[in-house]
Amino acid sequence: MRGAPPFILIGNAENRRVTLFQEALARQGLSPAHVVPWRELLATPGLLAGLPDSEALVRIDATGENWEVEKALLKRGYVDALEHGCSVLTPEQVDGLPQDHGRILSPRQHHLGFLRVLTELEATFAAHPRWRVLQKPSAIADLFDKRITSRRYAALGVPVPEPLDGVTDVASLRQRMHEEDWDEVFVKVSCGSSASCLGIFRRGRSRDTLTTTIEVAETGWYNSLKVRRVEEPERVDEVLTFLLNEGAQVERAIPKARLSGDYFDCRVLMVRGEPAFTVIRQSLRPITNLHLGGKRGDLDAFHEVVPRNELEAAMESCRMAARTHDCLHVGIDLMYEEHFTGHRVLEANAFGDLLPNLRRDGLTVYEWEIREALRDLA
């Protein structure tokens, strides 16, 4: 790969996403990426703009797992959050926060701060036409709104869980579910990821219930590693009200197919619009995320049970969804319906490529992406 342009990598320098990508570059015989840390970029907005407009590939990586970055984004989103009716933290309150891992801190405000930064990046990139940006900031913004992606994919004919529109509060949620004759829905903060700020709301004959990743404690609310069932009516309504006020995607809960007796879904990593890697996630519960008790399923066992025509149809849906975004890679969450009678694209992830210990044709995920990014230059 002699003569390949250098990479500029925007990320958290200490994070394994960055270190694994640097290792992948080295294994490909390429120079290390020039890392622009999120923390420094947020503190000095002109840091990236000051780099020369010479040929380069720009990769934007996740902002997560850095407390200083999280606080900076909360402060960036303060003014916009005041107009959204969501929970709000003043810059002074943010400065006084102790680091408390897993605590839920005004997710919509944090997201609005991130959107402001993405807009600034668009302007910087426009002033550097020789840079090739692997994920356009506007595409990342779309991918961080489940309401946008769900409706966009449906308009293309991609099967998705049907959204429930017209929900403004808990009363209208119950009313709309009654009108549609739905017993169970997912309520997801539209900018969330990794099953954070998620609830599965079920209407019961005698009592409504909520299965959620949110833990309510004396010191605050937390994204928990334990999925819990809430039955107390006041607490159910309290959590639902929070989710809806933060801006939520509400969609019909559809029974998932099973693999070896477990519920399962798939993370399909699309690279240049084609399926590159697939991870099977299976669990005793419909929420299959690996950090919530799920486990990686066996890909060979999956191929033995999924009908070939349904597999091909699902991969075509993934292509249609991924190609609507100007991104080198998109992580697609895909489910198969019970008894493999169909499939649904659940959502898409701009940073869904942290899939360690996977290889294809001898290449890791990041090595595959590097190869495809350079091939795209030809």
Image (cartoon, helix red, strand yellow):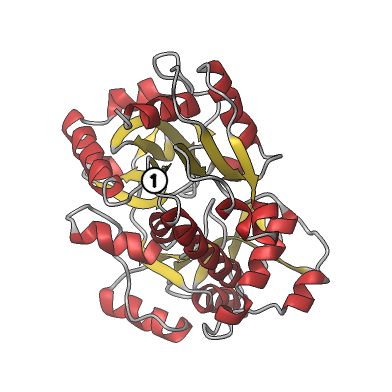
Q: Is residue 334 above or below residue 227?
A: above
Q: Is residue 362 above or below residue 20?
A: above
- Percent position (x, y) of residue 140? 43, 55
Which residue is at the front of the view, 324 or 315? 324
Tell me what residue is drawn at x 33 percent, y 31 percent: 377
On screen, residue 104 versus residue 200, left or right, reads right
On screen, residue 271 versus residue 353, left or right, reads left
Which residue is label 1 attached to?
333
Q: In the figure, residue 105 lies in which quadrant?
A: bottom right
Residue 293 seen from this side: no
Can you say which quadrant of the picture contains the N terminus?
top left
- Percent position (x, y) of residue 356? 55, 28
Tell me what residue is drawn at x 53 percent, y 16 percent: 29
Q: Secondary structure at mark 1?
A: strand
- Percent position (x, y) of residue 353? 48, 38
Which residue is at the front of the view, 279 or 175? 279
Which residue is at the front of the view, 77 or 261? 77
Residue 275 seen from this side: yes
- Percent position (x, y) of residue 28? 50, 18
Can you say which quadrant of the picture contains the C terminus?
top left
Q: In the figure, residue 80 lies in which quadrant?
A: bottom right
Which residue is at the front of the view, 178 or 216? 216
Q: In the figure, residue 315 lies in which quadrant?
A: top left
